[in-house]
Image (spheres, grey):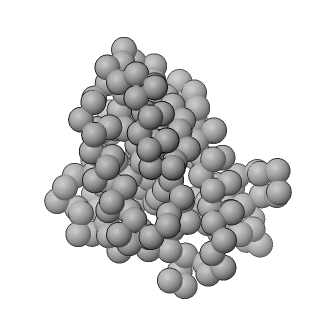
Amino acid sequence: MADLPLLKVVIAGDGAVGKTSLIRRYCEGKFQASRVATIGVDFATQQVQLETGAVKLSIWDMAGQERFAVVREGFYRGSRAAALVYDVTDPQSLTDLARWRKEVLRSAPGQKLVVVGNKADLPRTVPAKTGQAFADSVGANFVETSALSGGGVSALFETLARLASTSGREKRWWES
């Protein structure tokens, strides 16, 4: 795994939308119903097999609380793709993605994005077409997921890996 390209990606969105649960489901194959809020940032690594070969994702989990905004900004630098996550049961979390997108692009201009509607297993108040419309409006990919069931989670991280591996940047994330 050491010889694989290492690609930094970030997962951003409001607190409690399920960012950490998505990462845990993907990297560890499990779901934990009760979680403590992420403090600052956290990260995990996972190998992803693409059609062009394997890559290693360095997945950075950004704390969603506003008080961590100052800390987050520096951690976006060097990332090659970002997931903007909202909760399909919380319309405000989708509205807030415009702010999250701006925050990511301020530190990582030209970032490739995927919009993620999480908690798709729950009764929704945000239709998929609304999430898709936001993604289309900002030129992003769109996927719905359920960290609980695992639905869409592999597709999310494979999409991030594809976007990151085709970002055209030559520098590694630690060189920025």
Q: Is residue 60 left or right of residue 29?
A: left
In depth, the one of 27 and 171 nearer the eye is: 171
At horizontal 36% and vertical 14% (from top left) the residue drawn is 123
Q: Quadrant of residue 156?
A: top right
Please name whichever residue, 29 or 167, is drawn nearer the observer in this view of the structure: 167
Residue farthest to the top? 123
**Which picture quadrant has residue 100?**
bottom left
Number of disc labels: 0
- Identify the residue at horizontal 75%, vertical 68% (top origin): 4
- Does any portion of residue 72 appear in the rendered image? yes
What residue lies at 22% left-to-right and 52% top-to-bottom? Answer: 65
Q: Position of residue 154 (x, y in %)?
A: 63, 39
Q: Quadrant of the N terminus?
A: bottom right
| Residue reaching furthest to the front | 137
| Residue plotted at (54% across, 58% down) | 112
Percent coordinates x, y for residue 27 in the rendering? 58, 46
Give coordinates of residue 143: x percent, y percent: 54, 35
Q: Where does residue 89 sit, x and y in percent of width and height?
A: 32, 24
Q: Residue furthest bottom?
A: 175
From this viewpoint, is residue 24 visible? no
- The residue positioned farthest toward the left in the image shown: 67
Query: Against 176, is 20 above or below?
Result: above
**Eyeballing the image, is 130 above or below 71?**
above
